[in-house]
Amino acid sequence: MARSNLRLRISQSPVLRDGLAVLSVSAALGGALLIERLQLRNITLFLFAIAVAAWYGGTGAAVLALLLSCISFSYFFVGPSHTLYISRADIPYFILFASFAWLVSWFSSVRRRVEADLLQAHDKLKIEVSERSSLLNLTHDTIFVRDMSDSIRYWNRGAEELYGWTPEQAIGKSSHELLRTVFPSPLDDIQAEFLRTGRWEGELNHTKADGTQVIVASRWSLRRDEREQPIAVLETNNDITVRKRWEQEIQSLNQELAMRSTELEAINKELEAFAYSVSHDLRAPLRHIAAYTELLQKKATSTLDDKSNHYIKMMLESAKRMGNLIDDLLAFSRIGRAETQKTLVSLEQLVREALTEVRDDTEGRNIAWQIGALPDFYGDRSMLRLVLVNLISNAIKFTRPRPQAEIAIGCADGNEDDLVIFVRDNGVGFDARYANKLFGVFQRLHQASEFEGTGIGLATVQRIIHRHGGKVWAEGAVDGGATFYFSAPKPRGHLWKP
Amino acid sequence: METMNKLGRILLVEDDAKDVELTLTALEEYNLANEVIVARDGEEALEYLYSRGKFKTRSSDNPAVMLLDLKLPKVDGLEVLKQVKSEEKLRMMPVVVLTSSKEEKDMVASYKLGVSAYVVKPVDFHQFVNAIKELGVFWAVINEPPPGSVKK
């Protein structure tokens, strides 16, 4: 390497090149003069000098050496001596000499050029190879090369990092043995496909140096020599253990979910059948009790005493109440089962509609309404309407003892994602300790004789709001009025309209 | 003979004896009960409508209206309705569903099959009597039944 560089450097400097020509011819001249002195007239030494100049100095040096050789030869050895005169008889001799010298220098220069090219190609290759393997070491992927007998030939840094063996430990070993590879299908099948197509992709299980298992996405490429014989396999592996674990987890979660939803579906169906039978079979006997009691009342009122008539009245009232309870319960269960049809709903419009619906309850009452600006709401129109009707009629009902009832409906400060609507009254309120009971089915905080109702209204409100992804809550104090809130996600893509 | 001409025949399809009694009581109050035929299940109703079985000998005219309960033994109300509406001779006969159920799916199914009215029996007997009276008066007296109905 050092020598070849030295040679290349000499040939590249013109001063040294020409100097070499002069030096070699001078040496030849000296030698020839010495031989002349010994009566030996020989031109071979000059040819030798030209060859040396051509070999080491290139074509320029060879031409210079040839010129100097001719002059020296003519001056010293061709008569008349010590002149440059060349007799006609000597000219063919000179031409022959020059031709021969040219041939020698041409050979040597060609030879030298070939050698230089070869050296350069070799150096380039070396640089490329070292660059490439350092590139392969840069990547995080695990890359190794194995020959056709599965012996590892190259092992990059990624492979060392993943598996824990250094290149020195890995190279020369059988890759499948070292990594205890578990194949997805029989190895013979994989090999056959691989040799046929030159490529293979699949998932492999490997065992690391520390004994832990990894799952890799493996890609193999086959390398062939110029005679198309397979010589090596480049194997690139990606660690997908974590991803696989997630995938498995997701899969098992999905299965669980599918199972749960089948269960839920079955439960829902059962519930539906239950509600259906309640609706049909429970109402019929109730209707009969009421009807026959009424027929009895009609027939026997005059013959019965006051107490008996009172009993009959109580029976009828109870039957009616039970009828209402069944109806409310069925309506409540329907809300849970019905599909919500969501649209953008104007709450202002809905409040107006709800107020029309409860107008009968406000007759003869002195109520100061305070209705603030209300936003649009994304939800099921008829369900949301039921929410407002329930909350407003509650407010009307529980302000009944007030000579001046005040009911406010508005939009409270929610957060960025939720709208919060409230209905506030100055009615009898409730004991804050029982606030959590307000929204339960058939839960009532007041005597039925005080305020009528089945105790299903707020449960319905809660169920509807939950189905809209929102929350309900209430604030209040005994005799201090009550405020009911509900929230729901703000409609997306629509501007908040105060 | 003249009043008979005015009052159409009512086919009451009802399995519950109490409901039959109460319905007849309600109709009686308004003198609408004399032309009521009671079928106690869907099969009997179809036998009557097709004049077969024990109704083999009846005249082939259709009733002025059929009051039909939905939950019936053997052949249920919706099935009776389906058969009636697919039969050329019967499809024009008015059918009123009279049921305990307020179930939406029953209501939707009934209207889809072309029912004339859907009435939920009220728990309150007063309201029940009123409902039956109005139904009887409307369908058996006021409404002009389609051709092929009882005229005798």
Image (spheres, coloured by chain):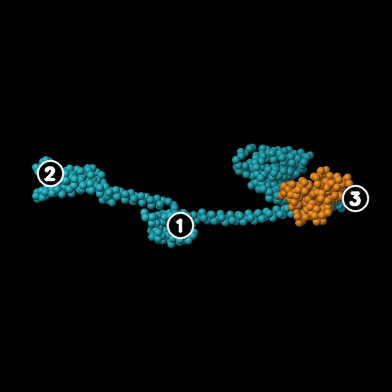
Chain colours: A cyan, B orange
What is the number of the mark on residue A302?
3
Image-quadrant location for residue A249: bottom right
User: Where residue A272 appears, x then y in whole percent?
Assistant: 70, 53
- Residue lying farthest right? A303
In this picture, residue B131 sits left or right of residue A264: right
Q: Is residue A23 visible?
A: no
For label 2, count other residues whose C-alpha is less than 10 Å away and answer few (under 14), some (14-19) or many (20+): few
Q: Three-letter amino acid code at disc 3?
A: Ser
Kind of residue indicated by mark 1? Glu
Q: Which chain is disc 3 placed on?
A: A
Is A283 left, or right, of A305 in this rendering?
left
Q: Secondary structure at mark 3?
A: loop
N-terminal of the pair, mark 2 or mark 1, is 2
**SS of the residue under disc 1:** helix
Q: Are marks 3 and 1 in contact (CB under 8 Å)?
A: no
Give A160 or A422, whichever is nearer the viewer: A160
Q: How many marks?
A: 3
**Chain letter for the residue marked with disc 2 in the picture:** A
Mark 3 and mark 1 lie on one chain; the one further toward the N terminus is: 1
- Whole-number angstrom distance, CA of label 2 to CA of label 1: 79 Å
User: In this figure, which residue is indicated by the disc labeled 1?
Assistant: A193
Secondary element at tag 2: helix
| Residue under the point 24% across and 47% down | A109
Q: Are marks 2 and 1 on the same chain?
A: yes
**Labelled disc at residue A90:** 2
B135 on left or right of A29: right
Co-location on one chain, circles 3 and 2: yes
Q: Residues within 10 Å of mark 3 (few under 14, many from 20)?
A: few
Q: Amino acid at mark 2?
A: Asp
What's the residue at 38%, 56% (across, down)? A229
From the image, state whether disc 3 or disc 2 is nearer to you.
2
Estimate the x, y position of residue A494 in percent, counting from the top left: 61, 39
